[in-house]
Every structure is written in C-alpha cells, then in structure tokens.
Amino acid sequence: MKIVIMGCGRVGAQLAILLHQEGHNVSIVDINPTALERLPEDLLDMAIVDDGTDEEALKRAGIEGSDAFVVVTDNDNRNVMAAQIAKHRFNIPRVICRIYDPQRSELYKSLGLEALSPTTIFIQLLKKKIVQS
Amino acid sequence: MYIIIIGGGKVGYYLARQLLAENHEVSVIEKDERKVNWIEEKLGSIAISGDGSDALAQERAGAERADLLIATTNDDEDNLVSCQIAKYKFNTPRTISLSNNPQNEFLFDLLGVDVTLSTTNLILEHIEEEIPPHLLTRLTTVEADTELVEIELPSSFKARGKKIKETPLKDSVCLIVRGEKKLVPPLNEFRLEPHDRLIATVNTKKEEELFSLVLGE
C-alpha cells in the first residue's frame, strides 16, 4: 500500500517505521525539520518538510494516487483540515485523522471523517482497568 | 443581527467596533487573555476568552442563536474549523471566513463555509490595479547598443492593424506568436494585432521613441 503520513511526532514516526518494515510504500510530511530526526536513515529519503494543510505540499508528499492518508500532528484543527483535503480534493480511499478533543472528534465523525480521539480511547481503557480490578 | 467573531486581532477588533456602531449585537472569542482585556476596555464586555474552534467556547458565546459567524484568525485551519463547528453543530445560518492561503478559497467553499475572503487575493487585486500592464521585457543585450526584447501588444495601440514594414519595428522583429501559433516569415508583411507577442531586436537609444510610435494611444 502507498501511505502518506502527516505529522512526524512519536506516533507518526513510529507508525512510518512499522509500515515501512512491513514493506509498505510510506512517505512522511512534517512542517518542522527537527521532527524528522525521529526517523531512521533509510526513511529520511521518504520524508519532506512542508505544510500539509496546503494542497501543493500534499502533492509534493506524493498524496495523489495513495491508498491511505494518516494525519497525526499535535494540532486538531490542522489534522481536520488536512484530512478533509485528502478526502474531498484527492479522493484518497482511506483517510484517518487524530482529534484529541472528543467533541470535535464526534462532530467530524458525523461529517464522514474517520476520526480517532486518543482522549476517548484512553478514558475507555482506564475505565475498563478500574472496573476489572 | 447577532454576530460572533472568532479572533480579536486587528481585523476582529475593528470589525467588532464597526458592527457595534451599526447596532448589531457582537461577541468576540479570543484565545489571548491580553487581547480579551483590551477589547473589553475599548468596546465593553463583548469578549469571551477561549478557543473559537472549540464547541464549548462557541456555546458560551450563545452560538445557537447567532445569525452569522465570522472567522478572522491568522490560521486558516482555525478559521475553517470554527466555521464548520458553527455550521454543523449550532446550525449558524451564515459563516464567513478569512483565508491567508489563496488556494483555500475554493477548499473552504467545498467544505461548507458560505463566504471565504482570501486576504492575499484581495491585496493582489488592489496592487495589480496600481501597476501598469507589462508590455516590454528585456531579454538580453546583443551588442553594446542592441537589445533583444519581448513585446506584448495591448488591446489597443497606435500601430494596430499596420503592417510591420510600415512601423518603426520594420526589419527588427524576429518572431511573432499569435495565440498559440508562431507566424511564418516574411514577418514584415504581417499586420500588428492586439495580444500578439513579438521578439525583436531594438536599439537601446531609440527604444522609448520606438515604443511611443508603436504602442502610444
């Protein structure tokens, strides 16, 4: 699969490494050059420094014709905007975005985005642990 | 009308002041506490401290009864999300957004924002009006006093319809592009038409005189 990841923080970088190890064609875009330092040497060729909320930048990152776009920057609004560009402008079949704010996450789910809220997921995990013990 | 403004920067502040003067009810949602205090000092208690792209802040501002939301922050993504929250969560009838990246005018329209104003485009349009059309580009110097130039003919000009051999450009045109086509020599026989693009060699000293003869009204 050809996958574009926006946001090279801990999650983005680690996801890129795992997908690359499994033989997927991965490219990474992050607005901050130092974020790319999280990547191993062999993945640096597949990374660019650019603003992923800009259509042209996403093209440079190779979004056209990709199978999936994953957006995991630490800014909910940037994630939401980039995800919608990928979905509505580039018609990427699978678009997944991280939205910390549960309310925002619910709203964008209702608008058809595949949104994951780490906050909600972690709360559920915690609750489960507490109830089990 | 009840109008919610997202962002209490320069645009947000002056917009709020103007709308208040026109007797509208206005709230400004602004992240920066200092700006909130400043607005309160100048315009009264109309400022709400918070993230305008957060549904909670919009709710505190009374978004469900707003007639219009205007997003004026410097971050396009915040403006987009503010408008989408207003529209899809609170059913605000009309949303207006500023965008810094001109490309986002089309995108925001696609994503449900009612009106998007690209500040970059607005400024460019105004500047372009102030700059005369660009008719002549110097390409290179051929000899000490001879230049190769590109000329783009405007819609109306003095030598319009004249054969090149009847104008001061006689024998100096080396290429004419009309529309997408390159015209075939002898070029001196062609009549000059609007929007033709010419490549010509001209004497640098006579350049101005030549252009007033050909291009002058």
Image (cartoon, rainbow, N blue to C red):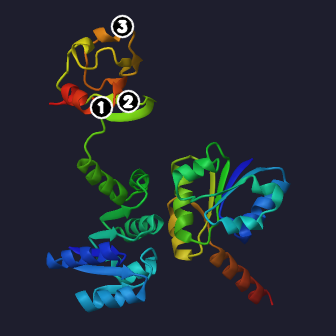
Tell me the tag on residue B205.
1
Protein chain holding label 2: B
Q: Quadrant of the C terminus of chain B?
A: top left
Type of the residue with mark 3: Pro
Q: Which residue is mark 3?
A: B186
- State the image coordinates of residue B40 (x, y, percent, origin top left): 29, 90
Viewer-nearest residue: A1 or B133: B133
Viewer-nearest residue: A68 or B143: B143
Q: Which residue is mark 2?
A: B145
**Horizontally, is B26 left or right of A53 in the view?**
left
Residue found 79% across the figure and 86% down from its top:
A132
Disc 1 to disc 3, how far (Cα)?
A: 26 Å
Asked whether the viewer can see residue B90, the reply is yes
Residue found 29% across the figure and 8% down from its top:
B189
Type of the residue with mark 1: Lys
Residue B81: quadrant of the picture: bottom left
Residue found 24% across the figure and 27% down from its top:
B210
Q: Quadrant of the N terminus of chain B?
A: bottom left
